[in-house]
Each structure stands twice: as structure tokens, then as C-alpha cells.
Image: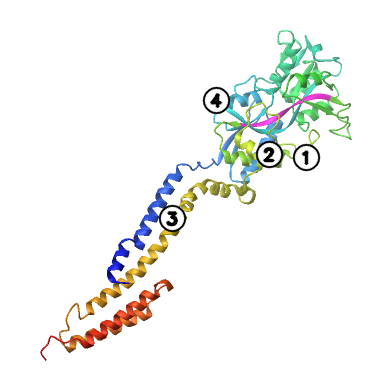
Amino acid sequence: MSRRKLRRQQRGSLSPAGVTAITLTLILVGFLVAYQFVDPAPPNRIVMATGAEGGAYQRFGQQYADFLAEEGVEVELRETAGSAANLELLAADSGVDLAFVQGGLAGDMPTDAAMALGSLYLEPLWLFVRRDFEIDRLSDLGGARLSVGAKGSGTRVVAGNLLAAHGITDTSATFVDTELSELGRTLAAGDVDAAFVIADPKANIIGDLLRAPEVRVQSLKQADAYVRRYPYLTLVNLPEGVLDLQANLPEQEIKTVAMTAMLVATEDFHPALVDLLLVAAADIHGAHSVLADSGVFPTGRFVDLPLSDNAARHFKNGPPFLMRYLPFWTATLLDRLWVMLLPLFGLAIPLIKLVPPAYQWRIKRKLLRLYTELEQLDPRRKAVANEADRSRRTVALNKLDNQAVTASVPETYKDDLYKLRRDIDLVRRQLLAADTSDSD
């Protein structure tokens, strides 16, 4: 390969420094572009609205708080009057991110800013009456004194809807606002004739009322009709003794209806926390219960609010792959940053194509340097001044030849290296035969 040809090829190749500069620039630009699509990190603190003190929502809220604390997420539990109040908090700018909400409220409450993450378990509607208060169906409650749940509770909404279907309102009956903890006393004292309670069978208030001698639980004779009329209701049959065989609670089979307790979040709730909460929900609510078989809950069914897209994906595919094997924050970080890896993958092919030209540039540059040195020793370019000059050039040629012998080049360049050595030998012969310009 001639020196001129080497120079021409060198001009068409990139230097290693140029390749490095272009590569770093492309990677930097790629990262800056990709960063615009990286989701923000999930918050490490959220606020969950639960319910009244001592209720199931508060008990389950604490279980969620304990579960998320192990994953590095702090949960502040906010006590409320119940489901209706929780929906109002989610709709307002209250700082509440997440709440328990009873099914059946969507048609009566503001829900535009809320989305369901799934239903968690069934909550039966219990009707407790004074033991000496005889009724056959809800229509018999006209003129009675009724505890229909506290203002802001889901019980008041659902009980009010069922009573209204029978023509009973607060003008044809007396609606009494009674604390859950006081129901047993007020029923025994005759302050109220009947009380509606929506609660998990394991709730303390249910056990207390079932054991109260002055109180009995009433079946809903028209429960089948309620289920047909209201799609958010589910028929529930509680066999005699199912809650406590030793105490035989309940004393007879109870036929009633149930709503689902939903986990509801604001519409801008972080997607990564949706997966974490549903993993927690499966751990807390997934076991067998007196109302559902194992694995039924949590589920995307039985919700009367729009189901979150992330929740729907979770119910279809399960938790993200990384979250199954890595701690939450590690999995979340990798899931967020995978977009940042796109520039690297996108540049892989161009970089692979740039590396061979850069390497070829280095080989050609090495050969070009040797040819440049050989050109300075060629007597045809510069006449030999004297014997001392001839001797100096001969030594330089020998050194150049040794460099060519020891030069490390790929097999594809071996011919160029041997050609260089032939050119060195040619110059050596011409140098020995050249006349000196010195008269000596």
C-alpha cells in the first residue's frame, strides 16, 4: 500500500477520538431525550382514609400500613365517618390518596376524581332489631325508630336506598344517628327499634350484637329481589353457627345482601403503588373466609367505579416481573430506568459499525508513519551527502525494518506489512548504490 493511498484512506476514516466523541454525544442526547419519558418516582408516604374507630376499615388499614412499611412506604391512616366521607375526601383536594369505599355509592356521590383498584371482600348488610320487635320485611319499618348509620357512612346511603324502595324516608320513620359502639345499649333500652349495620362478620360490633340477649338479627325476606334490582348487591346466606359453632352464632340461618369493600384511589395515584397495594391486598384478603373461597379476592369484579388501567393489567397478568423477585424500590427504579437504556440499545448497532473503521484507522496510521520515516531515508528524495550520512540512514533503515518485523497487525494487513519491508529493502539497496555528493 502506497503512502498516498494510505493518506487517502485515512481521510475517509474516523479517528478513535472522533468515534469516542460522537459516541458520547449520541449517548448524552439519547439519555436526555429518554429522560423526558421516565415516570417520576413513587412517593414514600401516602394518606389512607379508613373509617370509624374500631371498624373493619380501620383494622384493615393498619394491616396495609404494616405491609407497606416493610417495603419502605409510610401510610398515614385518617379516621373518617365512613365510605361516603371517604369518597368526598378523594374528590376534594384533601391530601387523601387512598381510601376504603363500600360498593353501591357511585350513583350518589362525586366520583370523577376516583378510580377503583379492586374489590377486597364482601360486607353483609345486617339488620338488628329489638328481640320483642316483630317485622316480616323492610316495609314493616314504617314509623319505626331506625339507626341507619352515621352521616358520611355508606350504611346510610345503602339503607336509605332500600328503605326508599319501600316508600320509607325520614318523614315516615325516625332516622337516628347512633354510634356503632352504642347500638347494643340503644336497642336494649328501646331508644331504637332496628339498626342497619354494614360490616365484616369478624367486626367486633357484629359479635357483640349477636351475643346481646335483647337483640336479634333479622333475615331480609326479599333479598333476592334486592339483588336483582341493585347490581352492586350480592346474595349472602349465613348458615346457623357459621360465625361461632360453640356459641351457635347466628342462632338461625341468615339471608341477606352484601356489598364489596373497594380500594379506591385518586386518578393520579402512582402506578407502581397500585401493584404494591394489590400484592398487599392478596396477602390480606386472599384467604378463605365464611363469605368467599380462597383466591376470590382481591378482584377487578364487583366494582361500581371505573377500574384503574394499572389494576386491570395487574389482575390479568399479575405483578410486574421485577416486583416478583426484587424489593419494591429496586424493582421500581429498574422499571422506571429501562427507558434510559434505549439509547444504549439504539446505539449498539452504529457503534459496532464504527469500531472497525476506527481500528483500521489506527493500523493505517501506524503504516503511514513507517512510510513517512522511510520516505525521509530514500536517496531518490534526498541525495546522500557523505558516508556518514549513508551510515546514519542505514542504521535508521535497520531500525525501521525491526519495527516493521515486530509490528502487530491483523492478518488482513500482513500483505501491507510485507510490502513495507520490501520497500525498505529497496531503499536499502538504493542507498548502498548511491553516489555521495561529498568529494571525499
Looking at the picture, which amino acid does disc 1 mark?
Ser
Query: Quick check: marks 3 and 4 in contact, CB under 8 Å?
Result: no
The image quadrant where one finds the C terminus is bottom left
Q: Quadrant of residue 99?
A: top right
CA distance for labels 2 and 1: 13 Å
The image's mark for residue 350 is: 3
N-term mark: 4 or 2: 4
Say which residue label 1 marks.
Answer: 294
Where does the magenta region start and end? Answer: 255-264
Say which residue label 2 marks.
Answer: 281
Which residue is depicted at the point 47% across and 51% down?
346
Looking at the picture, which amino acid does disc 4 mark?
Ala
Q: Name the front one of labels 2 and 1.
A: 1
CA distance for labels 1 and 4: 36 Å
Q: Is residue 22 left or right of residue 379?
A: right
Looking at the picture, which amino acid does disc 3 mark?
Pro
CA distance for labels 3 and 2: 47 Å
Is residue 121 in view? yes
Residue lying at the far bottom of the rendered structure: 440
Residue 263 vertical position relative to residue 326 in the rendered view, above or below = above
Query: How many labels were placed on the picture?
Result: 4
Residue 310 position in % (x across, y down): 60, 37
- Give 355 or 344, whichever is nearer the viewer: 355
N-term mark: 2 or 1: 2
The image's mark for residue 92 is: 4
